[in-house]
Image: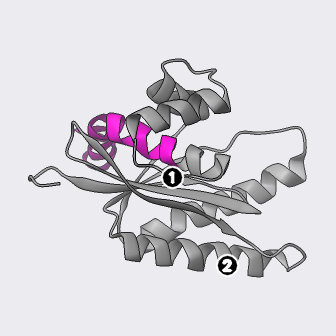
Amino acid sequence: MQGERHVRIIGIDPGLRRTGWGVIETDGVRLVYVSSGVITSTAGEALAYRLRELFEGLSGIIASSQAGEAAVEETFVNDNPRATLKLGQARGIALLAPAMRGLSIAEYAPNLIKKAVVGTGHAEKRQIQAMIGFLLPKARFESADEADALAIAICHASHRGAAALARRVAREGV
């Protein structure tokens, strides 16, 4: 894509077992699929080493994709406190990896992501995947984690102006 406003966005769907990632490019109007995948951590390894696997994987993808901005799904709280804590730690890695590369990072609630992609905050996984196929016809994803990450990137593409303004207001107190 050409133009002053084009940007590559990496969407990250954090998880300790599987962290989905998806990279798109936008010029403010069009969306283009770049790549997507899943980073897995080794089950049975100590937590610190699993988090390191996620960090190293995400760092490599961010560098090779030349992403300029990142978007991460906010954590939802489930019934199992241990699972929620582990998800939070994986989410910390999903925030740290792009921060270490100097990317601006936005966070979005799951319902906002669904609403941005499908039009309703209570969409089902298959509806999200169908809309991603429509919005990014060249996208090839093999898992819900990849699809979710692409949805996060799409959400950011449609909200990035408002997110940038909110960051500026918070930083400058305007």
**Residue 31, position as x, y percentages in the image:** 30, 43
Q: How is the image coloured?
A: one colour
Residue 107 visible somewhere in the drawing: no
Compared across the picture, whether 81 is left or right of 122 comes to: right
Please tell me which residue is depicted at 47% across the width and 37% down the height of the picture.
133
Which residue, given by chain and number where applicable, does mark 1 sit on?
140
Amino acid at dot 2: Glu
Please tell me which residue is depicted at 74% across the width and 72% down the height of the picture.
41
Which residue, given by chain and number where applicable, does mark 2 sit on?
53
Residue furthest top as drawn: 120
Whether residue 121 is situated above or below residue 130 in the rendered picture: above
Compared across the picture, whether 62 is left or right of 68 comes to: right
**For the residue labelled by badge 2, is the local secondary structure a helix, a strand or a loop?**
helix
- 164 in magenta: yes
Please tell me which residue is depicted at 85% across the width and 79% down the height of the picture.
46
Please tell me which residue is depicted at 44% across the width and 67% down the height of the picture.
99
The part of the image, by quadrant, that contains residue 174 is top left
**Residue 155, position as x, y percentages in the image:** 43, 37
The N terminus: image quadrant: bottom left
